[in-house]
Image (cartoon, rainbow, N blue to C red):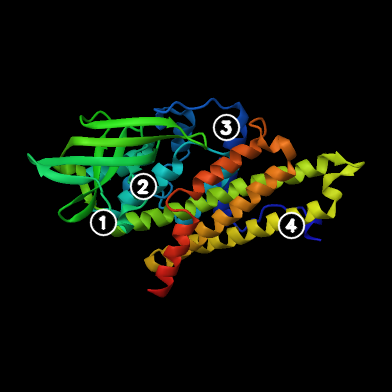
Amino acid sequence: MIAKLALGAADDYSEDQRALDDAVGRYLQGEYPAPAAREMLAGDADPEASPHWRAFADMGLSGLGLPASAGGMDGGLAELCVVMERFGRHLVIEPYDASAVLCGQLLARLPQGERTRALLAGIAQGAAPVLAHAEPDSDWPLDAPGAMAATAEPQGGGWRLNGVKRRVPYGAGARQLLVTARDAEGMAVFLVEAGNAGLRREGAPGLDGRPYADIVLTDCQVDAAARLGLAGEALEQAADAARVALCAEALGAMQALLEATRDHVSARRQFGQPLGRFQAVQHRLVDMLLALEQARSLTWLAAAADASDARRRARLASAAKAGCAQAARYIGQQSIQLHGGMGMTDELPVGHYVKRLLAIEHTLGDARYHLNRYQRLATA
């Protein structure tokens, strides 16, 4: 019975959110290339050189979630999720999640010194700094105090950074890096410019079409003002906002997969009738829809959580991240199988969506990490 419905996307947006979604959707529909038509980005691609990134800034999307004092629009997490869900439907590869959302939310929560305010204003105008935090022995060093983290030592009125960061999106081409390193007070955030001596970046194309880089800091010198503040709660809360936004992106990708699969089984014929007429196929579509709607409920519950209650938002963010990872794997696998051998080719968008969903699963903690984190937060 459910399969006979349109299986259309749920629309619980407010009037302003719907207008935002329509504006972003019109641009992407008219200007953004389909996955099969894109050229593979070089490992050192500069995100700010993308004409689409400039268009996003001109539309006000770069500063959507930033405070008005920094030139932003004071949008909430729900508005960021509206944009991210639309980006997921069109497989946008620009680092909106890693830069405008994660770095923007982090900088907004750090002490508002002159350098931090300048960085926030830059993001609102189209700058694209990225965060270098994951390390060879830990994806999230804040949870691993015994890990061999990057270090920062005072030297000559500034700081000397040493360490290795890995899997940084657009890390080899970004013009500015926010690097976490431990000093005498704890894990702190440092600004490192691209041309800094002692900075070595090795970029390569990633599974999802984005370039990623490993970064090596060897006696990398920065001035005293480059220390922006302690990471701590600021980084954890910013990461939770980015996790929910990534879940919204996954919703858009899963919705696109569901629609592509529905259209395929409606058009593909076997034994004289469309595949969609077979009850077994209808049941699979229904199961995909149920998985998507459960993930959607978790995501929007987390997006609506009160930002002042950091522990509850963190718990809901982990629930959404774990739930979306499980739903994405199921929907991705079913989409490929129902498309048959064609589902494995790059000519169809199915494989591109599945690869992006896999990348989202392993960004800012995978399903296992967030199930364990949810349990810790729920029983603390």
Distance of label 3 from label 4 (alpha carbons): 30 Å
Q: Amino acid at mark 4?
A: Val
- Within 10 Å of disc 3 (Cα), the crowding (few <14, some 14-19, many 20+) is some
Distance of label 3 from label 1 (alpha carbons): 44 Å
Q: Nearer the viewer, mark 3 or mark 1?
A: 1
- Position of 334 with respect to 364 (left or right) is right
Give the quadrant of the C terminus.
bottom left
Q: Nearer the viewer, mark 4 or mark 1?
A: 1
Q: Secondary structure at mark 2?
A: helix
Q: Secondary structure at mark 4?
A: helix
Distance of label 4 from label 2 (alpha carbons): 38 Å
Give x and y (percent) for residue 190. Answer: 23, 44
From the viewer's side, name the closer residue of 36 and 299. 36
Q: Amino acid at mark 3?
A: Tyr
- Within 10 Å of disc 4 (Cα), the crowding (few <14, some 14-19, many 20+) is some
Q: Secondary structure at mark 1?
A: loop
Give x and y (percent) for residue 154. Answer: 11, 44
**Residue, far right:** 272
**Residue, far bottom:** 379
Of mark 2 and mark 3, the one earlier in the sequence is 3
Who's the residue at 47% across and 48% down the image? 362
Q: Nearer the viewer, mark 3 or mark 4?
A: 4
Of mark 2 and mark 1, the one earlier in the sequence is 2
Q: Amino acid at mark 1?
A: Gly
**Residue, far left:** 156
Q: Amino acid at mark 2?
A: Gly
- Residue 104 is labelled as 2
Q: Which residue is mark 3?
A: 32
Q: Which residue is mark 1?
A: 146
Of mark 3 and mark 4, the one earlier in the sequence is 3
Q: Which residue is mark 4?
A: 286
